[in-house]
Amino acid sequence: MLIKKQVFILSSIINLKEELKKQTMIKKIDKIILLVGLMGSGKTSVGKRLAKKLNLPFVDGDQEIEKAAGLSLVDVLKCFGEEEYRAGEKRVMKRLLQGSPCVLASGGGSFVADQTRALAKLHAITIWLKADIDVLYNRTAGRKHRPFLEGDDSHLKNKLEKYISEEYPYYSEADIVVETKEEQVDNTVQRVIDAINKFLKAA
């Protein structure tokens, strides 16, 4: 009886170790993990938890733009217009993509820039958090801090559909695509980690 109990305990420990192994990276990440996608795809919420799991710093691209400009994103757009907003965004993304390994949540639309995509190919593993129109709408409706989605929510779906049509072809150049949906953030994070593992094994 005692031997059976010991065998059972040993088996349980082995199973637990195997399960923990599945939830960690197969090797240390020595590149930037760049999260791209439309506003509301979950780049910030997923990015923060992913960074903790990977033991990497988290960097928010939008916050870095605000620091560089000394203004909120909404005010940058209002004061300088979209062309200068995007030019400033490109400069910030260039600096960040040439920096140390981290989990970098990019601003919505920043991956459209040729320069940003070229730098990402050199210095990052790019992950597209792809969400459908209903998920994006539910996450962005009523939010006033997103500069390109300001206005009445009655027109929000039209705006999102426009961005999907214009920007998804660029996001499709990402190394990894992970569908994001209405689920616990930790579940999405684990699916991202699984996708990175698969990508690194194939590399």
Image (cartoon, rainbow, N blue to C red):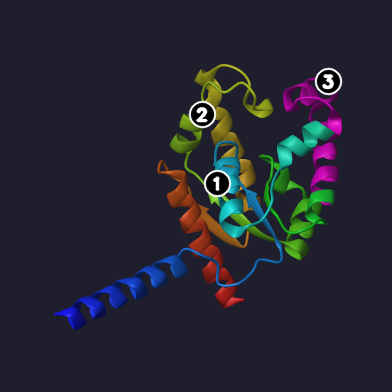
For marks 3 and 1, give the one nearer the viewer.
1
For marks 3 and 2, give the one nearer the viewer.
3
Q: Which of marks 3 and 1 is nearer the N terminus?
A: 1
- Which stretch did the figure color magenta? 68-94
Q: Along the horizontal axis of the image, is 10 left or right of 43?
A: left
SS at badge 1? helix
Q: Is residue 172 visible?
A: no
Q: Which of marks 3 and 2 is nearer the N terminus?
A: 3
Q: Name the residue under label 2.
A: 157
Residue 198 x, y percent position in the rendering: 52, 70
Residue 87 falls within the magenta-colored stretch: yes
The Cα atoms of the two marked residues, 1 and 2, are separated by 23 Å
Instruction: Give the quarter of the image for residue 102.
Output: bottom right
Q: Are marks 3 and 1 in contact (CB under 8 Å)?
A: no
The Cα atoms of the two marked residues, 3 and 2, are separated by 26 Å
The Cα atoms of the two marked residues, 3 and 1, are separated by 31 Å
Q: Which amino acid does label 1 sit on?
A: Val
- Residue drawn at x 85%, y 25% is 80
Residue 126 x, y percent position in the rendering: 65, 58
Q: Residue 46 carries which label?
A: 1
Front in this rendered view, residue 17 or 53: 17
SS at badge 2? helix
Q: Quadrant of the C terminus?
A: bottom right
Label the magenta part by its dominant secondary structure. helix
Q: Are marks 3 and 2 in contact (CB under 8 Å)?
A: no
